[in-house]
Amino acid sequence: MTGGAAGGSGDRFALYDLFAAYGALIDAAEFDAWLALFAATCTYHIVPRENYERGLPAGLVYCDSRAMLEDRIRALREANKYNIHTDRHLIGLPHLTGEEGDATLVETSFAVYQTDQEGETRLFATGLYRDRIVVEAGRLKFRDKLVLLDTFAVPSLLATPL
Amino acid sequence: MTGGAAGGSGDRFALYDLFAAYGALIDAAEFDAWLALFAATCTYHIVPRENYERGLPAGLVYCDSRAMLEDRIRALREANKYNIHTDRHLIGLPHLTGEEGDATLVETSFAVYQTDQEGETRLFATGLYRDRIVVEAGRLKFRDKLVLLDTFAVPSLLATPL
Amino acid sequence: MTGGAAGGSGDRFALYDLFAAYGALIDAAEFDAWLALFAATCTYHIVPRENYERGLPAGLVYCDSRAMLEDRIRALREANKYNIHTDRHLIGLPHLTGEEGDATLVETSFAVYQTDQEGETRLFATGLYRDRIVVEAGRLKFRDKLVLLDTFAVPSLLATPL
């Protein structure tokens, strides 16, 4: 990875920081700061891996613009008043898979755990982030984020972003 | 992060190594080497996230000095003679959140799995390390480690540090 | 880590990339690319931690050469036609533990989740990779990979490499 959005050593750390912040901000329910990790023009999709591989369009979340993503987050916050839980993201080392124009292509494994009000912690979902990452105003941002879920059977998906 | 305990690129790797060693040494039950990752003056607290956010003082483990932490570890070793299990830490990428005096503030997600004598592996706990990290004798050390557990319902907590 | 296979900053990123690719390629079922992460002369063993610590030879997978590993992968592919599931690796930060000749010794925690055809995702196994990593034709490769499983009770182990 010598060109693209994440050349040099500082840029590589910036890439790692982007993912560390991504998970941390969801888990802390700091959704404005989380939104700031996305580019001004961005997409955010959650699709079960099986549907994606078969070319089925059915996504669980389908935000084709930043405005849609912001709307979605507003709705989640409202829903969360009634569905109290906390999230915990475990995110693997980013896997750089190539460049596409000015974007760096990155794939990253994740697991999300949820803890309910009774204090029970459960595995909620595992999957793969498939991202196009760009530099915007000197900082790395997600331009296109595709969340490929390992399962099509995710309960109560609306609760938070993944 | 240009100042503080983890400036430069080598220091960043040292930070990553500190966390890699932290989990590995617990999992290998090498508690003397694990203690050596803490500063001469240090604290180590385990607190359920909910208590912490409500400002409740009730912690599960509360070591306000290195002597207390060493005592605690001695007690755990004794207890472990009767509670045989093995740990496995999965620790995310450290999230640098700021500087405070000579300390770097770092937040890091973790999951701990335990395997019992019947060979069953279960998720034991997830949570967030909130650390103040300093340089001591040229090496990064934990000065204050706060283990925020996602749940207040942790069984058999005494078994090992987290 | 100043000598060995992973000195300098670029080499450290190469080490991280090696592990990111390792998990990603299994999860994507790209086994030829996965095999290319191993040195021409290599070993690959899967052993329950308990057996290993007691010096028992009984391994679950025991490939003492690259030819054996390639055979094994061929067999797994055949078996996978009838045992459909997907894997998801979460791999921690590599822990550099020393040098041995031209090899860097690295220990790395992992968790593997599997999702079955009903869409249920379960923790499959946790453990520790204990690797000897070398440079071959300018790239980092696994020369000896020991997969220490936390449990001796792994169901349907044949399904994929770990």
Image (cartoon, coloured by chain):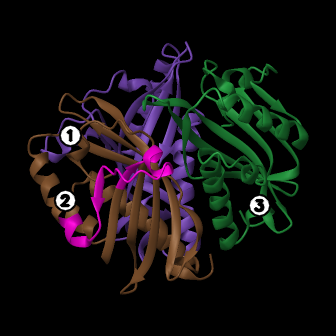
Chain colours: A green, B brown, C purple
**Quarter of the image where one finds residue B32:** bottom left
Is residue C63 visible in the rendered image? The answer is no
Q: Which residues are magenta?
A: B46-70
The answer as to whether the residues below labels 2 and 1 share one chain is: yes
SS at mark 2 in the image: helix
The answer to whether C104 is drawn above or below residue C72 in the figure is below
**Quarter of the image where one finds residue C142:** bottom left
Q: Amino acid at mark 2?
A: Arg
Q: Amino acid at mark 1?
A: His
Residue B159 percent coordinates (x, y): 21, 45
**Quarter of the image where one finds residue A102:** bottom right
> Residue at point 33% right, 63% down?
B44
Q: Which residue is mark 1?
A: B85
Residue C82 percent coordinates (x, y): 50, 13
The answer to whether A8 is drawn above or below residue C146 in the figure is below
Give the side of residue A42 with respect to residue A35, left or right: right
Q: Which residue is mark 2?
A: B72
Residue B58 is covered by the magenta coloring = yes
The answer to whether B95 is drawn above or below residue B159 in the figure is below
> Residue at point 26% right, 27% down?
C153
